[in-house]
Image (cartoon, grey):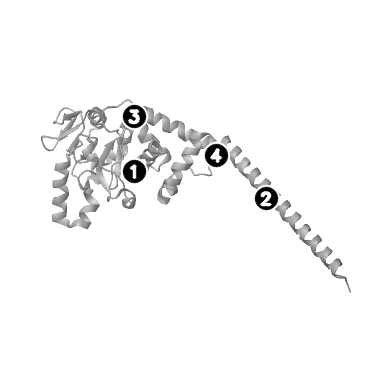
Amino acid sequence: MQSNSTRLFVLAFCVLFLFACTKANAKDAKKNKTETENSNKIVAEEVPADVQKFYSVYDSMSERFKNDFALTKASNISEIQNFLADLKTVLDEEKKYTQNDLSLYYLIDKKHNAGSSYAPKDLVDLKSNNYFLVNKNGMQIRADAYDALVTLSQAALNDGITLLVSSAYRSYAYQERVFNYWVSVDGLEEAERESARPGTSQHQLGCAVDFGSISDDFAETKMGQWVYKNAASYGWSLSFPKQYEDVTGYRWECWHFRYIGKPACEFQKKYFNDIQQFMLEFIDSWKKN
């Protein structure tokens, strides 16, 4: 049998051995952690800051957005940088428009509003003229959008189409009356699908126009078909497309177009599946990030 001294020696040896192993493992773990942190730091440093910002904004977007968006986080950096170059072109274009007012890309929807006191600073009157017709007096539109409306109307005339403007700028108070009217006619739930609450309407920005009959049958008219096919070439974007009510908050409105400029329309089509809401949400998040 082993003596007590031998047993104590073996026990002490085992304790010292385990201590040495634990210390070595801890040292290795610390080394591995440091190497991982340094590796991550190097990888982060290798990714340009604007691409890292892209990743951050992309992560903040909805799954529906990600399904429609032309890029993913797995896209190579050169593809993302091409996108960012196009984004810069659009943001530079934004600077050409009135600077003492809300941007033409201002995100206004059920979650973002312009407030009860906002009104565009450069509204001009809309009257029937040699380029387009209006269905009522007293309408106004932002000056940037007015020039673009004339250009659009001239192109339509060249194809034998005379555009009819049926609604343009609406004040907060006017939109409040419109919304309350539709609530009285259809009830709140249905009204929410087709009319904006005051403060959340694109019309309050002064750069949105309703054409023609303001009804679904507008899409079947020659005017409606021409506008749908050609509007983007002149900077006008369809705001509420089919099958995107869960994104825009509103059912399809074939008559409602918002002026955002030709570069933005091209950008929207190239990367955002031609969905205005997606593009404006990305731009809004990009500016805030």
Residue 252 on image: x %, y %: 28, 49
Q: Is 188 left or right of 67, judged from the image as shown?
A: left
For image coordinates 11% across by 37% down, the residue present is: 136
Spatial CA span between label 3 and label 4: 28 Å
Mark closest to the chain's N terminus, 1 or 3: 3
Crowd around label 3: few <14 · some 14–19 · many ≥20 (10 Å): some
Name the residue carrying label 3: 94
Mark closest to the chain's N terminus, 2 or 1: 2
Mark closest to the chain's N terminus, 3 or 4: 4
- Depicted 73 relative to depicted 129: above or below: below
Mark closest to the chain's N terminus, 4 or 2: 2
- Depicted 165 relative to depicted 31: above or below: above
Q: Which amino acid, mark 1? A: Gln
Q: Which amino acid, mark 3? A: Glu
Q: Residue pushed farthest left? A: 137
For image coordinates 22% across by 43% down, the residue present is: 199
